[in-house]
Image: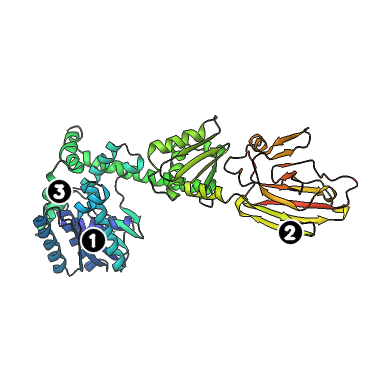
Amino acid sequence: MEGRSWHGIIEHVLNTSAEHMMWAPGDSIVVAVSGGPDSVALLHAMEEISRLHMPLRLICAHVHHGFRPEESDREADLVRDLAGKLNIPFEMARVDVPRYMEDTGKGPQEAARELRYRFLHETAARHGAHSIALAHHADDQAETVILHLLRGSGPGGLSGMRFVRHEKKVQLIRPLLRMYKTDLIRVCEEKGFTYAIDSTNEQRKYKRNAIRLDVLPFLGQYNEQLVPSLNRMAEIMSAEDEHMDTEAHRTYQALVHNEGGRSEIKVSAFRELTVALQRRLIKLILNYLPSDSENVDFHKIEAVRRGMIQNHPTTWSLDLGGTTVAIREYDTASFFTRERKQGSTASAVYHHEIHGSQDSGFIRLPEARGAISWKRLADSSEFRIPMGPNEAMLDEGFLTFPLIIRTRAPGDTMQLMGLNGSKKVKDIFIDDKIPPSLRPFIPLVCDGSGAVLWIPGIRRSPHAAVQANTSSVIYMSWQPEGGTVTGD
């Protein structure tokens, strides 16, 4: 791509924008212009395209970082004058990077970037812009790939910068991402476009500068086409990363159940996925959770993944930092924030009564994710054997009213059919592999004497069983929301 003429660059930008659907006629676009040759060339190219090829509304945006006061003032004046000559609206912000560094603890480049993008987004919102055009080029892309490689990034990082990325309701677009800086400088010189040179670009204390000045030239000894090769790799990785993201989202929709701020997935289904998709899915689940910390580093994702594929132990809990928790309970893995867990435990205690004067009724139990209905049956033709653990038939003659629907209390025991004596409800939950996080919510149906008659969805006591001479039955039904509370 070297040796491009100005006409060739315009043609290239038009082709790139069409390929990646960067804009449409009439779009408003904020063009970020630092004053360097790349951004100056971009503004000129966008202005010519909007004037001769496609109507666009451009806004020139410049950030005065305040690092080099006199030099920054000259850059601001240069960009302001350029926007004026091209008859493009000009927006500028002065930001205090040193103070922001002090307030946030961030380094100079990261702090400057955050403040710059904040201003660009504010400008886009103020003008109702569809996109923010950035002047990153192929040499920047090569630096980015090396920088991410040194950090140990996965495919997402090795994809480098995207041609188009959606962020805060606008598109970030990079029309020059396949262009090389030498071409941009040459056309600026040939066309007489005035630009500035940032003196900090030669300071090796900034990692990106060191990569450009030292690392890339050193590696270039072993590959004369290093920068094109890195850009080619970024495009290949970008396409494959996008494919894997699509697969991860499809898998998320198919396998992950969300309710009340909690994301759940069956471990048996998770194990069927490839390792790459397992990692992507965990990352996606964690990204969707509200959290006050970064949960998506490789070590956390791998800890969760290994915990989900292991055979023993079948229950564990991982604190992922901040407020995020991952737990596995038998065949179910759950992800949620700690606030939800604390709030749910606090609201788990409930107590409802069914009195003998009531012939039917319905009690919703949001804490248990379900509801219990009941009715009195006096016709023996309606008596039948319950269809499963979600139904119970109780001989009214052996009941003490009121019947009570409540949460488990310490020391609760229950008689079991076919078993002499009683068993602790806690042990019943363990034997039936009921996840510990669900146990505080599961209802117990008791009668006025305190006997536990039925654990909906799980077990029935022989107490008040229907006999041949039963004349009146209380029929009860458990209706779970979105599934049962039973174990695996």
According to the picture, the residue beneath numbered tag 3 turns out to be: 182
Which residue extends farthest top? 312
Secondary structure type for disc 3 = helix
Q: Kindly identify which numbered label has been placed on residue 18.
A: none
Q: Would you say the residues marked 3 and 2 are in contact, meaning their CB atoms lie under 8 Å apart?
A: no
In the rendered image, which residue does mark 1 sit on? 31
Residue type at the position of mark 1: Val
Q: Nearer the viewer, residue 283 or 393?
A: 393
Please state the horizontal and vertical placement of residue 451, each as a whole percent of the image: 75, 44
Q: Earlier in the sequence, mark 2 or mark 1?
A: 1
Q: Secondary structure at mark 1?
A: strand
- Classify 10 Å Cα crowding around label 3: few (below 14), some (14-19), many (20 and above): some
Q: Residues within 10 Å of mark 1 (few under 14, many from 20)?
A: many
**Quadrant in which the C terminus appears:** top right
In front here: 355 or 117?
355
- The image quarter containing residue 465 is top right
The residue indicated by pointer 2 is 361
Q: Nearer the viewer, mark 3 or mark 2?
A: 2
Viewer can see residue 371 = no
Q: CA distance from mark 3 to mark 2?
A: 80 Å
Q: Residue 115: give x, y in percent of width and height.
A: 25, 55
Q: How far is the residue under mark 1 from the one under mark 3?
A: 21 Å
Q: Between 11 and 350, which is closer to the camera in this rendering?
A: 350
Numbered disc 2: secondary structure: strand
Residue 230 visible in the shown view:
yes
In the shown orientation, is residue 410 left or right of residue 137?
A: right
Q: Earlier in the sequence, mark 3 or mark 2?
A: 3
